[in-house]
Each structure stands twice: as C-alpha cells, then as structure tokens.
Amino acid sequence: MKGYAMLKIGESGWIEKERPQCGPMDAICKPLAIAICTSDVHTLWEGAIGERHNMILGHECCAQVVEVGSMVKDFKPGDRVLVPAITPDWNSLEAQAGYSMHSGGMLAGWKFSNFKDGVFSEFFHVNDADGNLALLPSNISPVDACMLSDMVPTGFHGVELADVQFGDTVLVIGIGPVGLMSVAGANMRGASRIIAVGTRPNCVEAARGYGASDFISYKDGTIEDQVLALTDGKGVDKVVVAGGGCETFESAVKCLKPGGKIGNVNYLGSGTYVNIPRVEWGVGMGHKQINGGLMPGGRLRMEKLGSLVSAGKLDVHPLVSHVFEGWDHVEEALFLMRDKPKDLIKPVVKI
Ligand code: NDP
Ligand code: ZN
C-alpha cells in the first residue's frame, strides 16, 4: 500500500509499505476523507515528537472498515466510521484512572503518526476497535466528519479543562480550528461573554458565528491590557488557550479573576519553562488554576460529539475552508497547512 510519510524531520513524500496486520481486537480501515492538522506541521517540520523515519503521517480522518479481528463485536467490514485522533488502550491502568489519553505513558494514547503509522494511507490500523471507533451518522458527510477526529474533541476539552459554567466570561486565546471549537463549546456551556483572540479574518468571522462577542488581536498590544480594558479591570472567569506560546500563560494568568481557571490545549513547542507571574497569581494564593491536556479519545466521546453534529446542534462545516479530491492533493493540503494563508482554516482531502 502507499502512504504519505515523514521521511525525516523536514522531509516528506509517498512511500510503499506492507498493509498493517489486524489483531483480534483491531480493525483495518481505509480513509474516506482526511484532514491536515497543525500537529502534522509540528511533527514534520518542527520535530515536535523527535526524529521519525518513513512514518506515515496523519491522525484525522473518516473511514470505512475493511477488516476486523475475531473479538470485535460492534463493527464489520463496510461500516463507515468516525476515527478519533487519540486511540487509548482501554484496559490500561491510566485509562482506569480516568486518563485514557495517557495510556501506556504520558501522551501515549496518541498513536497515529506518533508511535505507529498514521491515516494518510490506503489502509491504517486501529487498536481496540470496539473501544475507539464510532459509526458515522448517516447525515454527516465524510468531510465534516474529519472535524470530529481532533478539532471538536480538542477544542471542547479546553472548555472542560477551563470548567466553563453558565454566565462565565471566557477568554479564548487562539481561534484557529481548535480555538473555534472552544468558542463553540464555551457558548454551548452557557458563557455569557466570549472574548476571542486572533487575526485571520475568516477565523474572526467564524468565531462570531460560534458565539464570540468581543475580539482582540495579539498584534495590537498585550492580551491582558486589552482584556482588562474590556472588563473594567476585572478580568475573566475562564481562559481557554488554543494558540500562542509559553509567554501566553503570563497573559492568561493576568487576565483571570481570582478563582479563575485556565484550560490549555495548545502545543508548547519551544522554551524550557512556562513562567507564572507571581503577583497576578495572587503571590501564590490567588486560586488561579492552570490545567492542560491532550484530547480524550475513544468511542463514547466520538458517539456523543457525533450526535451533536448529527442533531444539528453543532455545525462543523465553517471549519472546512479548503476541500481537495484525491490522494494526489495530500501534499498540497499539507503544505497549505504549513504556510497558513490568510483564508485557511482547515484543509480536507476527499479520497
Ligand atoms: P492555528 O495555527 O490554526 O491557530 C492558532 C491561533 O492562535 C490563531 O488564531 C492565531 O492567530 C493565534 N495566535 C498565534 N500567535 C498568537 C499569540 N502570540 N498570541 C495569541 N494568539 C496567537 O492552530 P490550530 O487551531 O490548528 O491548533 C491550535 C493548537 O492546538 C496547536 O498548538 C496544535 O498543535 C494544538 N493541538 C492540540 C491538541 C490536543 O489534544 N491538546 C490536538 C490538536 C491540536 P492568527 O489569526 O493571527 O493566525
Ligand atoms: Zn489533529
């Protein structure tokens, strides 16, 4: 089979590989549509997970099952499925402790294009098929379904980590596709005011559609100065971080009211430390919590998030800015994600 792979840090291309083997609890699937992620860019060009040779890229797709293992009960060849980016081992101790995304070690629930070949491939392997796949609702297109692999669960997890409550004023730092889903999630959870940070015009427009009420640009001065000006110096109840860098935490802490919470889903790609501003952290006593996490994967979450889209309560289509047809366009879509032109939110390739 052929797959589009990271050959080494900074180099990618098509390679030939053996089709993966199906274990008793596993499934082999073929993509119906794939999406490119900012994390693919971090992996390939920034060496975010270290050196990898000839590893097939990709962790966002919608697929058709072609083979299942002898112990798989709920899926069969021909089923169209949602595939989460994170596919935990559900019998691990970490999963039993409630942190399935870290099954097998920190962040090790992330297997596609990390510890094994990813989904930019004619066929790919899914561990624990009954625990990780979900049937694709018939009224969701494969293109939209790709947004359920990572963008919806990650953006929503930021909202969970920030513990957004009815009536909260929420700051969402970063309104790429992940942050847009944080805006949507905060809105669904009853935020009264959502302040969005970002500059790309179509992201700003999409954020407005998902419920953002105020907009600031990180290019127009510090985030904290602008947020404090918008909130009469009081700050916000919650912050979701879905963009920026290590320095963004200083702003996030400065924007929070005492007792506030930060939910980070952003990848921190450089620097050794995250600095916490001492005075604004209440000299250690401000009850300002900082949480950060990898998205939870698994079937239950996929089914629940899929049903939100299926029921018309969440429209993911505004995230899809570019649609290509055919494997030949994977490279073009990947390079587009790296270059992030102004009109890009998320590129998807229909297979
Ligand atoms: P994008 O690059 O599309 O969006 C980033 C956003 O952050 C944009 O709105 C951008 O603004 C904004 N931004 C850039 N620089 C700053 C800054 N200095 N201060 C404040 N905002 C800034 O990324 P994605 O939405 O695709 O992904 C967001 C992050 O989530 C990435 O780091 C990605 O790796 C991570 N991620 C995490 C996962 C998890 O499970 N935790 C899973 C998937 C992704 P502008 O409009 O100007 O571009
Ligand atoms: Zn992703």
Image: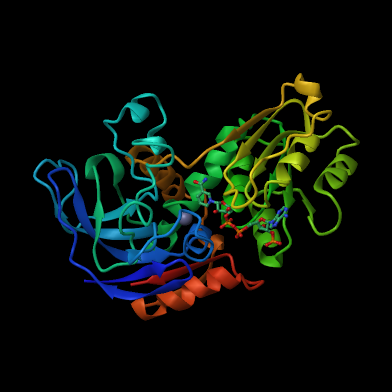
Q: Extreme top residue here?
A: 285
The residue shown at (25%, 69%) is 122
Q: Extreme bottom residue here?
A: 328
Quick one: 348 or 265, which is closer to the camera?
Answer: 265
Quarter of the view holding residue 190? top right
Colour setting:
rainbow
Quick one: 52 or 228, which is closer to the camera?
Answer: 52
Report x, y in % for residue 313.
51, 46
The residue shown at (62%, 52%) is 270
Report x, y in % for residue 18.
18, 66
Q: Give above or below for 329 relative to 312.
A: below
Quarter of the view holding residue 236? top right
The residue shown at (29%, 47%) is 133
Quick one: 79 or 132, which is closer to the camera?
Answer: 132
Q: Give above or below for 129 relative to 291.
A: below
The quadrant of the image that shows the N terminus is bottom left
- 18 with respect to 97 (left or right): left
Report x, y in % for residue 61.
37, 59
Q: Ligand 1, what quadrant?
A: bottom right
- 189 with respect to 333 (left or right): right
The residue shown at (78%, 28%) is 281
